[in-house]
Image: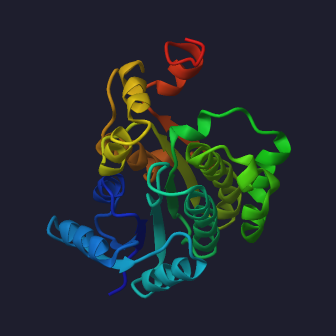
């Protein structure tokens, strides 16, 4: 018997938390770079009463993206997409961050947008980092939103000499995720589907712990200590927002980015986290 399908990319805590909120009654096709991690996450969901299957998945590869879509379609119509895959500034060099977080996400939105079922919905997990860099020109923002996917990595401001370090590459990638979500939401709308972006701040996950123990660890610890919430967030708090966006209660929300960072970005521009402070 066919079911509506939820594609979940990334087997981390945020993606799993969202799947537990919105994945009941669906077939969850869970993609992760390592097959064993995908299988382990699927097993965790199945033992909680869900219907999940794991598959190897590489967000930087169009071929891999088309493969997970094909696997998903073998179970039924694709109604939901949750993209929680990616690499952080402490995990990868500049070129890899751009290929996975920027290019790969753009391709995923493009390809799923061609087949998403009417009434379907997608949520992309980006980052507060997209809000923490100088404004781009209108032309640069438009290019991030609308350039053909195979031309994205050739944009002049994404070349190695124009990117300071891995954090800057990550910020540009997340800015692209948000702009791309807006542009792709227009195309998804033609199919009667919606697409939104969630930009989390410091969320306690294994990836965040890598950052806490990395070269910018003190920076991140200071960030959540001086944000209005005074603490990092949890994966379940991100899932709260995703549940709203992917339910009928969010039926009028599409092409939007929801910043969920405990007020860290507000503090960065207008509070004790200001660089001048």
Q: Nearer the viewer, residue 145 or 60?
A: 60
User: Residue 221's spot in the image, x, y percent?
Assistant: 36, 28
Asked whether, in this view, residue 163 is left or right of residue 224, the answer is: right
Q: Identify the residue shown where x is 42% and y is 39%.
A: 215
User: Residue 225's spot in the image, x, y percent?
Assistant: 36, 21
Asked whether, in this view, residue 68 is left or right of residue 42, the answer is: right
The single residue placed furthest to the right in the displayed view is: 139
User: Residue 117's spot in the image, x, y percent?
Assistant: 54, 72
Q: Nearer the viewer, residue 170 or 203?
A: 170
Q: Identify the residue shown where x is 60% and y is 64%.
A: 99
Q: How is the image coloured?
A: rainbow
User: Residue 22's spot in the image, x, y percent?
Assistant: 34, 58
Q: Is residue 71 shown above or below 36?
A: below
Q: Is residue 118 shown above or below 254?
A: below
Q: Identify the residue shown where x is 41% and y is 18%.
A: 226
Can you say which quadrant of the picture contains the N terminus? bottom left
Q: Nearer the viewer, residue 63 or 111?
A: 63
Q: Nearer the viewer, residue 136 or 245?
A: 136
Can you say which quadrant of the picture contains the C terminus? top right
Asked whether, in this view, residue 211 is left or right of residue 195, the answer is: left
Q: Is residue 46 shown above or below 263?
A: below
Rendering quarter of residue 116: bottom right
The single residue placed furthest to the left in the displayed view is: 47
């Amino acid at each position: 018997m066919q079911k509506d399908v939820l594609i979940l990319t990334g087997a981390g805590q945020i993606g799993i938390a969202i799947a537990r909120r919105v994945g009941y009654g669906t077939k969850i096709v869970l993609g992760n770079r390592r097959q064993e991690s995908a299988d382990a996450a699927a097993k965790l969901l199945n033992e909680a009463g869900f219907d999940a299957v794991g598959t190897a998945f590489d967000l930087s590869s169009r071929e891999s993206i088309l493969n997970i879509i094909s696997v998903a379609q073998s179970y039924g119509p694709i109604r939901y997409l949750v993209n929680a895959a990616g690499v952080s500034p402490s995990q990868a060099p500049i070129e890899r961050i751009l290929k996975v977080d920027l290019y790969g996400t753009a391709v995923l939105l493009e390809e799923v947008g061609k087949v998403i079922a009417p009434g379907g919905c997608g949520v992309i997990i980006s980052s507060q980092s997209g809000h923490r860099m100088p404004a781009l020109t209108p032309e640069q923002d438009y290019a991030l939103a609308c350039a053909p996917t195979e031309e994205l990595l050739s944009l002049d401001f994404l070349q190695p000499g124009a990117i300071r370090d891995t954090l800057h590459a990550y910020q540009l990638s997340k800015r692209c995720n948000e702009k791309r979500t807006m542009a792709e939401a227009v195309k998804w709308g033609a199919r009667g589907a919606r697409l939104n972006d969630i930009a989390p701040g410091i969320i306690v996950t294994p990836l965040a712990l890598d950052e806490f123990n990395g070269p910018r660890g003190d920076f991140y610890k200071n960030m959540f200590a001086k944000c209005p919430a005074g603490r990092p967030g949890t994966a379940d708090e991100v899932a709260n927002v995703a549940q709203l966006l992917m339910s009928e209660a969010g039926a009028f929300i599409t092409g939007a980015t929801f910043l969920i960072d405990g007020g860290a970005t507000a503090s960065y521009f207008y509070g004790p986290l200001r660089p001048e402070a």
